[in-house]
Amino acid sequence: ITARTLAGVLGADVVSYSGGTASFDTKNVGTGKTVTGTGLGLSGTDAGNYTVNSTATTTADIDATSLVITADDKSRTFGASNPPFTARYFGFTSGEGPADLSGTLAFATSAALASPPGSYAITAGGQSAANYSITYLNGVLTVTSAAGSATSGGGSGGGPAASAPAGGADPVYQAVLAATYVPGNVNPVLQLA
């Protein structure tokens, strides 16, 4: 109890309201909620000349507590599925946790299976509670490049190009076949590029 008001003190008598504890009718958010003070008493040099009630009531407000839900950062390689998303909670009052919230925590990201390497936001949402003012903070999904590739041919010698994943099986060759028509010839001249 931070403040008390005492009425009925005569003249310059030294008497004050003291002691006691106060409690709300419930812990839930609300305005004009009943507060009951108990264990109140008198103190001061003239306190013995007075009697006072040991309980008193007043009203006060309970505001929502700030709660922050932050999506955790994650990473994966290009072409892989997104990993399971998770989040951290900051601001629960003592003895409470995610189970005291309504709804189901859900995540979203614009990163799809074929999304190129880069950074993508992970957003969270879907939970609420009357006693909490919830703020959601984004996480980051980092998509990294897949394993490197090895190439063969296709140089100044004009041979076909081949590629294969590093450490993989034999490369698959790719060639472009071009035809050049020479006047007077029955068949065009074929060139392997």
Image: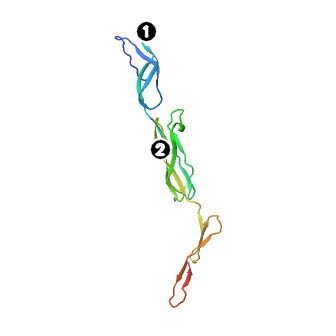
Q: Which residue is drawn at 46% across and 42% down?
A: 135
Determine which residue is flagged by label 2.
136
Q: Is residue 19 left or right of residue 175?
A: left
Q: Is residue 165 left or right of residue 62?
A: right
Colouring scheme, one of rainbow, by chain, secondary structure, one colour: rainbow
Query: Which residue is nearer to you in this view: 14 or 109?
Result: 109
- Residue furthest out toward the left: 11
Report the Cα–Cα distance between label 1 and label 2: 57 Å
Q: What residue type is labelled 1?
A: Gly
Q: Which amino acid does label 2 sit on?
A: Tyr
Residue 64 vertical position relative to residue 106 in the rendered view, above or below: above
Q: In this view, does 82 lie to the left or right of 6?
A: right
Tell me residue 58's x, y (percent).
41, 23
Q: Do the residues labelled 1 and 2 touch (CB within 8 Å)?
A: no
Tell me residue 150's x, y (percent).
60, 67
Image quarter hosting the N terminus: top left
Marking on residue 78: none
Q: Total of numbered circles in the picture?
A: 2
Q: Identify the mark nearer the N-term, 1 or 2.
A: 1
Tell me residue 97's x, y (percent).
54, 37
Badge 1 element:
helix
